[in-house]
Amino acid sequence: MNNDVILRVLALMLPRAVRARYLEEWRADSFAAADAGLRRRDIVRGAAALTVTIDRDLPANTDEPRGAVPRRLARRGLGLFAAAAVVLAGAWLTNGGILPEGPSTSPQALDALNTVAWISLRLAMLAILVGVLYFGRAAIMARTTLARTAAAAAMTGPITIALAVTFDPHWTVLLAGIVLSAFGFAAGLAVVTGPSPLSLERRVASWSVRLPAAMLGAVVVALILVIGAVDLLVWNPQTQVPGLSLHAIYAQMSEVDQFSQSTALVQVTLWAALWGGLAAAVVFRAARRSQTWMTPRRVSILLLAIIGGAVFFRFFAGFSIGMSIADTFRTTGANTSIVSAVLPYVGQFALATAAVLSGWAPKIHNANTSEARDVAVA
């Protein structure tokens, strides 16, 4: 292989801030190797040795404060782990996803839901694998016992769980994987938060930038709340009891199960008012010109968390309705509406995206200032 190609590959393994400088030096040394009585392969070996031993956390090599890069990498790994945990927990709570079995559900809709479940599970596994890579990079750069231990646990834990689920060995193997993953997550938090002083780099966004993001997010929240409420009160009962009008369904529920329609309406209204109020509070804060800290990324995290929370607690808002329908008409959860099958995925993906955005903090840009020594997480 051409020596220049090898040098370029080795340069790509260096921190971004010093790649061009070292590549230029290596090329110059390789060109003048014969005059110095050296072989070009010696230059390549020296470049490889430098690539392996270079201090990847040195501020001169990263243009960031020492400790900032490994912590940012660990934070991204934690964000990906949290996103995967949300999706996998949702799959566990819904037994792999809600699939309506009513006569009104089309085969195309069922195929689409099965596809979404398949894709979401693969995305969760991919997030775990990429998170392991981020933890590994953080451990290599941090060069601390805690970081290396966290990376080892974070890498072996998910692999152990995957093997346990695939081959079904003794239950202790699965338990060991869960313990290792939990330890890696906790130790990763320790890597992110300490031991040096921790502060956030000040980031601001103009009113004209953050307000549209807040308004768009609030519209999405309102749309989900309206659809979720109508589904609880109208669409889902009609889907579970086909052939009867909505009035007849509620009348029979009141007669047989002493169901209170007004109480159910209050519960759904309180649910929508709570989460709608939280979204409105985010928009109100974003609209104030003094709240420059509310960048579009932070606004998105808050509103996505609100969407996820609203979808999750929607179950409790409609619990009395669902139980009364089941007791009155002897129905099962399999006859749910298509909206009730889709919304859990919306909530899971919203929370997972919020977790990833929380981990994907932008790079610190004040490495050359006196305050940069104390900045640990961007």
Image: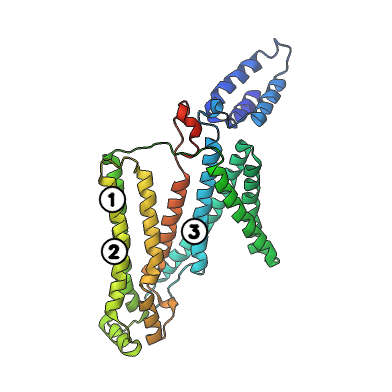
- The structure residue drawn at horizontal position 29% and vertical position 60%, both measured from the top left corner, is 276
Q: Residues within 10 Å of mark 2 (few under 14, many from 20)?
A: some
Please tell me which of labels 1 and 2 falls first in the chain. 2
Query: What amino acid is labelled 1 in the image?
Result: Val
Identity, as a three-letter code, of the amino acid under mark 2: Ala
- Whether residue 150 sits left or right of residue 69 in the image: it is right
- Name which residue lies at 54% across and 43% down: 192
Residue appearing at x 28%, y 73% in the figure: 266
**Image location of residue 21, percent across then percent down:** 56, 21
Q: Which residue is mark 2?
A: 273
Near-viewer residue (242 or 106): 242
User: Label 2's element?
Assistant: helix
Give the left or right position of residue 234, taking residue 341 as reference: left
Residue 278 percent across, percent down from the top left? 32, 57
* Mark closest to the chain's N terminus, 3 or 2: 3
Q: Estimate the spatial distance between the alpha carbons at disc 3 and disc 1, rounded to whole Å.
A: 26 Å
Circle 3/circle 1 CB separation < 8 Å: no
- Distance (Cα) linking label 3 and label 2: 25 Å
Expressed as whole percent of the image width and height from the top left, the position of residue 330 reads: 41, 86
Q: Which mark is residue 283?
A: 1
**Pointer 3 local density, CA inside 10 Å: few below 14, some 14–19, many at least 20:** many
284 in relation to 334, above or below? above
Image point (46%, 34%), residue name: 364
Front position among marks 3 and 1: 1
Q: Which residue is mark 3?
A: 86
